[in-house]
Image: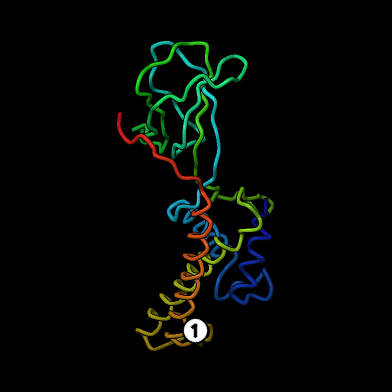
Amino acid sequence: MTTLAALRAKLNDEIGVLTDAETSPWTTAQRNTAISEGYAELWRSGVWKDGKQDLSTVADQSVYALTSIRKLYRMELLDDSSRILEMPKGIVEPAFAGDGSFRLRLSRPIGSGFTLRVLGWSPYKSVFSGDSDTDDFPAEHSRIPILKAKAVLYRQQLSKFMRFGETQVLQPTMNVSLDGLIAGIAQAEREFAELVRELSGQRPRTSLTRRL
């Protein structure tokens, strides 16, 4: 796990910020937001956090609330000695509650007294409460979301360049060519895409039930 402060230090190195207290061209808050956006992009790019959730079965119940699984890998029905009895079929779908929650819907109800183990994936953490808050992403891959954060910040600069260019009054911090900004964005995005493709390719694949 890596703290937000340490992640920002890595981002500072990527974008040439010499001291963390600098406010130009990006404030600390802007860099933190870019880091959060980089982590949020992992889910959309196919880099997911694996996990499991154990549910106690209820007789005649086929729908269960989920808190830690958003994409299903497989399910295991366990007895009271944690032996696998079977692998039930079902799907993970939105709970349609308006709060972004998800639920598990089984193809058929299971009797009570068993444990239903749900294996699958969820997004990595992307919201940090402060500098000491840590991520849940493997440290050896932490440069991946930082590359996306770098692209986010460069896009901000590109927007500023275009905005000030309209008035023909460029600030000193905009002393960079438009081509240079575009090239920097493209390079960061290219590296990010290559790394997420490699990392997401390590995820196990399986045939999932998409409908009952």
Most extreme residue toward the left is 211
Q: Quadrant of the C terminus?
A: top left
Q: Is residue 90 left or right of residue 74?
A: left
- Residue at horizontal 52 percent and vertical 35 percent from the top: 68
Residue closer to the observer: 101 or 57: 57
Residue 207 found in image quarter: top left
**Amino acid tagged 1:** Met
**How are the residues colored?**
rainbow
Q: Which residue has dot 1 on it?
A: 174
Residue 200 placed where, x, y %? 50, 54
Task: Locate residue 44 relative to residue 149 in the image: left or right.
Answer: left
- Where 49 sits versus 155, above or below? above
Callout 1: 10 Å neighbours few (<14), some, many (20+)? some
Element on which disc 1 rests: helix
Q: What percent of the width, then of the height, locates residue 28?
A: 60, 65
- Name the one closer to the observer, 98 or 64: 64
Q: Position of residue 126 (x, y in %)?
A: 53, 51
Residue 140 is situated, as x and y percent measured from the top left of the image, at: 65, 58
**75, above or below 131, in the image:** above
Q: How many marks?
A: 1
Could you say which is closer to the camera, residue 125 or residue 137? 137
**Would you place residue 204 above or below residue 143 in this image?**
above
In percent of the image, x 53 and y 69: which residue is there?
Answer: 150
At 50% from the left edge and 41% from the top edge, which residue is drawn?
121
* Foreground residue among 107 and 66: 107
Against 177, residue 53 (above or below) is above
